[in-house]
Every structure is written in C-alpha cells, then in structure tokens.
Amino acid sequence: MGSQALRTDFELEEEDRFFISGVEKVGRSRNTYEHQLRKRKVLVGVLIAVCSLGLVALIIGLGWGLSHRKLDYVCPRTYDPGNTDLVFYVIGDWGRAGSEDQQKAARLMSDVSQCMPPKFVISTGDNFYPSGLSSPADPQFQQSFTSVYSAPGLQVPWYAVMGNHDYGDSADDATLTSCLSAPTSEKQCEGKCCISPFWQTVPELAARDGRWNATLGNVVTRTFLLGAASSASGSGGTLDILFVDTVPMIYQYESRRWASFLYGFKNQSAHVEDIKASLVRQLNTSLAGGSKWRLVVGHHPVRSYGSHCSQPDPNDCMDMAFLRPWLREYRVAAYLNGHEHDQQLIKSDTDPVYYVTSGAGSETRAGEFDNLDSDERSKDALFLSDKQGFLAVVFSGASMKLHFYTTGQSGPTYTRVVPAPSSST
Ligand SMILES: *[C@@H]1O[C@H](CO)[C@@H](O)[C@H](O)[C@H]1NC(C)=O
Ligand SMILES: *[C@@H]1O[C@H](CO)[C@@H](O)[C@H](O)[C@H]1NC(C)=O
Ligand SMILES: *[C@@H]1O[C@H](CO)[C@@H](O)[C@H](O)[C@H]1NC(C)=O
C-alpha cells in the first residue's frame, strides 16, 4: 500500500529501487515521535556497541600489557641474556605430591623460567615427603616431581642431594612395621616396601625422568664453564659446585628407627670420615686447579636463624660447624642448603662465606622469624623469608647475583651481588 503511494509521489530511477523499502518506512514515520525515539535508540545502541567494543579492546589490551609487564617484571631488571654466563635455580624441601604449597613455588619457578631460563636446577634435599621413595617405581616420583615441574623451561638437569626425609625420617609407625626395617641387599627389597635414599640414585629412576640426577653418601664435584657470553673459550673461568650428603653428619639420627633402612643413615655414617676427607680433597683440587668459583651444596645448614639451629640440643648447625674453616680456607663463595623451610641469606663481616638457605619449596613455617631479636638479626642476616619460593643464581662477568623469589611478589624480593672470592690469601 505505502509503496504504491510512494510510487505515485515519485518517479523512481532504476538505481533508487534498492532503497525503496527504506524510503517507504522513513516516509511513513518521518517527523513522528516514534521516529525520533527510534533514532535516539539506534544512536544509544551504536554508542553502547562502540563503548563495549572499546572496553573489550581495553581489557584485552590491558591483559596483554599486564601479562607482558608481569614477565618483564618477573625477571630481574639487571638481567641481560647477552651478557650472562650461567643461570641456575636452587630449591629445597619440596616433594609433597603437588600440594598447593608446592605448586606456589613451582609456579614461580615456571614464570621466571620463561624469561630467565636456568641451565640446571639444584635440589637441596627433602625431595620426597614424608619419608622418601619405597622403590624405584614409587608413584611419588611422578606426583611430586615430573608432573609438578612440567614447565618447558624446567626441562633441564636436576642435581639433587639427600635430606633426612629422603632417608626415611617421619615414617609413621604403620610404615615402620610394614616396610623392611633392616634389609641387607637390594634383592631383599624386590616387591616389598623398602624405603631407601638409594632409589633416587638408580638408573631406573633416571629412566622415568631423564632430568633426575641425585647423589647419595658421597661428594661429587660438577664443573661448569663460565664466560660463554663473552667468549667461546670460557675466559670467565670455571665454577665448581660440590654436592655433599650431609645426612650422615647429623648425630641425632643415630638413634632413629629409620637409621637401618637400605643404604640408610647407619650405612652412610659408617664412612662419614671418608666423606669429609673426600670433601677436603675435592675442595683442594678445585682451588689448586684454578677454578674461579666454588659453591658447596648440602641439605643441612651451617648457619641459620631457623628452628633447626636456634635450639641448644639437638642443633644441626653445631653438627655442621666442622665445615666453616674449610669453606674459608678453600675460598668457597657460598654454602647452599635446605632443611629449614624458609629462605635466608647470612653474611657476617668476619666470615667471607655467604650462607644461603633455600628450603621453601612447599610447606613453610609462617612466623618463623617473628620472635627473632632485631639486634641479633641485624648482625648478619641480610634476608629472611618464611614464604614459599626459590633462589635464582646468575653469573655474569666477575659477579654472582643471588635473586631470592618469594610467592605473592613480582620480581625478585631480594637480590645480593656477590663478588668472586680473591684468588690469593
Ligand atoms: C651398606 O649396605 C650394603 C647393602 O645392604 C651392605 O652390603 C654394606 O655392607 C653396608 N655397609 C656398611 C658399612 O654397613
Ligand atoms: C649426572 O650428572 C653428571 C654430570 O655432573 C653426568 O656425568 C652424569 O651422566 C649424570 N647422570 C645422569 C643419570 O644423568
Ligand atoms: C692440595 O693440593 C696440592 C696441590 O695439588 C697438594 O700438593 C696438597 O697435598 C693437597 N692437599 C690436600 C690436603 O689434599
């Protein structure tokens, strides 16, 4: 009807036919209130659409920006891959079947590995809670290690030392009665529950996850070439890291029921003097061989403000005190340990050695340092944290940077630059 009326009003050209229905509608509603209202609605609709699009774009942009900013910020501002000789991470006391506390530190490591990937990871022990592996097929290895540290940047060698829990500490009564208490051979263990730190060192375990590389009851020196950034010949010298099993050195374990497990405490402590002699020999070889840097890794602390060293008896730092003169004499830059479920950096004016605790890989002791006397603490405690986290160590030029990462914080929470120890006394 309307269209007919229009046709009588206008002579339509061919090209105008396309618009006829629109013109018809406009013609019908022109100058009416409804038309004004519709115009306004369309305008508002368009505005809302434009605003929504803008908002979505803003959110996406902000999200993108934040995720990129986060990564920029996660890595230390001083980090320059082109001028870096070596990066590695240190974490301890972690294996709790992927619990939320374990994931906190694992996520942090995975984030940092995206912008500052490590060459390897050091585990300072207590790799499998509560009481180590009971066979080379123990599912804990998958649950606590392989499936947790699955980020692409963490697919590097993991050099681990043993902690007391890896030896069986904290095995409950039921476990102690149902598992073999004093096996005399691996053969006896076949098909039985048989807790032993030894399972962490067997080829069957490394076959399950090729990253795993643990040492038990002895001292192993691993040498790394520095200066790759500045020259292919390694003009930056070498770094020797000595991995020590400290469990056999702690007297209080002598009387524990788990001390007789396969290759357990009693078996290893029987040759503790050999372990110590081997450590001195390897330190001496490293220094005499002209290695620029030396680090020593063990589970138990030598210096600590944590609970294992703030009580008189037993006091694990007392058992480990024999190391202090050797660390000085052989110019070890830092001693790295776990055992305390926290992070600490201790450096006194009278001792050239940096004492580093990185044992915050899962459960931590919240409030651990709250009652510490502030005078006491200010003497030599550079950094103390009771939060989950790990340590990233970066070698570049003549210095080693210690970046302490803690959960809930972007970027390193604390960084300390350690100069290379002097090569002469
Ligand atoms: C250590 O354990 C192994 C395997 O059970 C045994 O053959 C060896 O004699 C033990 N050594 C000591 C000193 O107990
Ligand atoms: C463990 O690391 C050392 C180097 O420090 C290497 O020679 C050895 O082959 C590694 N073992 C495994 C099982 O990967
Ligand atoms: C340390 O190394 C030097 C040089 O190789 C050697 O002469 C000395 O006997 C070694 N000392 C010890 C305690 O091993």
Image: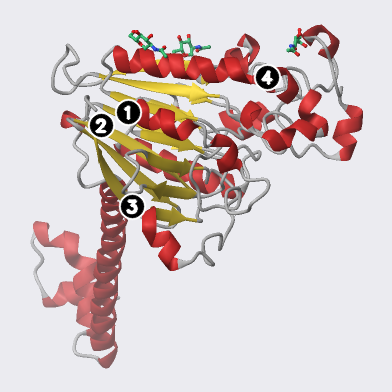
Q: Residue 421's mark? A: 2
Write down the residue under mark 1.
331
State the residue position of label 4: 268
Closer to the camera, 187 or 142?
A: 187
Q: Position of residue 219 (x, y in %)?
A: 51, 18
Q: Amino acid at mark 2?
A: Pro
Circle 3 residue: 414
| Amino acid type, label 3 | Tyr
Distance from Cα at disc 2 to Cα at disc 3: 21 Å
Q: Position of residue 265 (x, y in %)?
A: 72, 25
- Give the side of residue 173 with respect to residue 260, left or right: right
Mark found first going from the N terminus, 2 or 4: 4
Picture quarter with the N terminus: bottom left
Q: Residues within 10 Å of mark 4 (few under 14, many from 20)?
A: many
Label 3 vs 1, first from the N-terminus: 1
Observer able to see residue 126: yes
Please, is residue 101 above or below residue 166 in the view? below
- Is 324 on the left-hand or right-hand side of 410? right
